Image: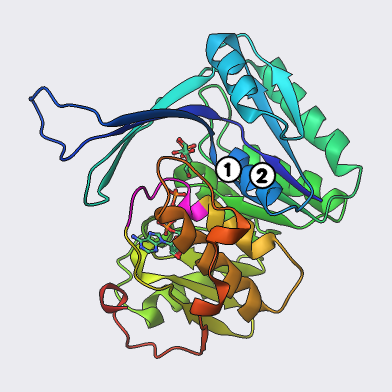
Amino acid sequence: MILTLTPNPSVDHTLEVDSLVRGEVLRVHATRAQAGGKGVNVSRALLGAGVPTRAVLPVGGGGGAELTSLLGDLPRVAVPIDGETRGNVTVTEADGTTTKLNAAGPALSAEEVEALLAALDDELSRSPDWVVASGSLPAGVPDDLYVRVARLAASYGVPLALDTSGAPLAAAAAAGSIALLKPNHEELSALVDRALPTVGTVTEAAREVLSWGNEAVLVTLGSHGALLVTGQDVFWARGPRVRTRSTVGAGDSALAGFLSREDTPQERLRQAVAWGTAAVALPGTTVPQPDDVATDSVSPVTEPDPLWRIEKL
Ligand SMILES: Nc1ncnc2c1ncn2[C@@H]1O[C@H](COP(=O)(O)OP(=O)(O)OP(=O)(O)O)[C@@H](O)[C@H]1O
Ligand SMILES: O=P(O)(O)OC[C@@]1(O)O[C@H](CO)[C@@H](O)[C@@H]1O
């Protein structure tokens, strides 16, 4: 069973337009409202693939009620909060360009933060195979929340996969004990505070993160695929070129694919890239179903050339 924690979930509203022009009246071809938030998306993707999962998330107000109804039969622990669950907006264009407007989300009180961690503690005591902690932190939640999550997971011997950015990522990565970090290229670059133009520089940055006491780094590179860096090896893989409809949730789908089955690092990377590639061909925050995923079209490369430029991959 894979447990997920999403401290700042959302209702994702997607608007599809031909082309986004600032200051104009634009006609919207299609709109959709879907359950969102990074850990929620990981759980949704796993559920679709028949992998047991459970999502822990705070919910509040009308947005929380809408999110609850959109979650359908996803197994979950919803922690009630006074604030209003956020709505995020995505605009996708005909060429696949994706523009996202993410709200800050509700402020959580200190008691609500403790209630969320208590719900997580309770679920961790049931020995899930992994816990995934993902996304931004709402106002009122200290930047070290994921450090506390890592300690809690370690106390139960449950491996933690973390996908976040900025100060919460910096705090948790520096504290160590994370089985898998999933930054994208930009997030890793911000974490080590330098540009990472090549496979070699990305690998070096990931190795620096491992030296802080973490076990593996899956760096997703958007259309350039993903690099998996462990203490021993480096693997790179990219999917086939696909028509992009929306990149929202590609990283979450990649993480779900990586965790979807016990396997070798190469096979996990193959699944991750296949699931991420499948996600971008789907609209809005739609996560891929098993039939959408073309695993055979992904061939991981062991020890890719450090001189390869990321933008050319
Ligand atoms: N434009 C694209 N074309 C093909 N595959 C893509 C594209 N964008 C993403 N992917 C696939 O999805 C994976 C995850 O993408 P990305 O690096 O954009 O994650 P992310 O930034 O965490 O995304 P998000 O935060 O929106 O979930 C990539 O490793 C790649 O396999
Ligand atoms: O604001 P955060 O928490 O960083 O990201 C939230 C979010 O953009 O992430 C998901 C896609 O990964 C979306 O469902 C959601 O709207």
Label 2 packing within 10 angstroms: few (<14), some (14-19), many (20+): many
Q: Residue furthest left?
A: 24
Q: Which residue is mark 2?
A: 43
Mark 1 residue element? helix
- Which quadrant of the picture is home to ligand 1? bottom left
Residue ID at (58%, 22%): 67
Left or right, 183 with reference to 42:
left
Q: Nearer the viewer, residue 127 or 230?
A: 127
Residue ID at (63%, 21%): 69
The kind of residue on which mark 2 rests is: Ser
Q: Is residue 295 above or below residue 127?
A: below
Callouts 2 and 1 close, C-beta under 8 Å: yes
Quarter of the figure that contains the C terminus: bottom left
Q: Position of residue 178 (x, y in %)?
A: 68, 58
Q: Quadrant of residue 14?
A: top left
Q: Is residue 102 above or below residue 220?
A: above
Residue 118 tag number:
none
- Structure colour scheme: rainbow
Left or right, 146 with reference to 38:
right
Q: Residue furthest right?
A: 126
The kind of residue on which mark 1 rests is: Asn
Q: Which residues are magenta?
A: 244-251
Residue 41 tag number:
1
Whether disc 1's CB lies below 8 Å from ligand 2 is answered yes
Residue 181 appears in the figure: no
287 is within the stretch colored magenta: no
Q: Position of residue 281 (x, y in %)?
A: 40, 55
249 is within the stretch colored magenta: yes
Q: Nearer the viewer, residue 91 or 216?
A: 91
Q: Position of residue 257 (x, y in %)?
A: 62, 61
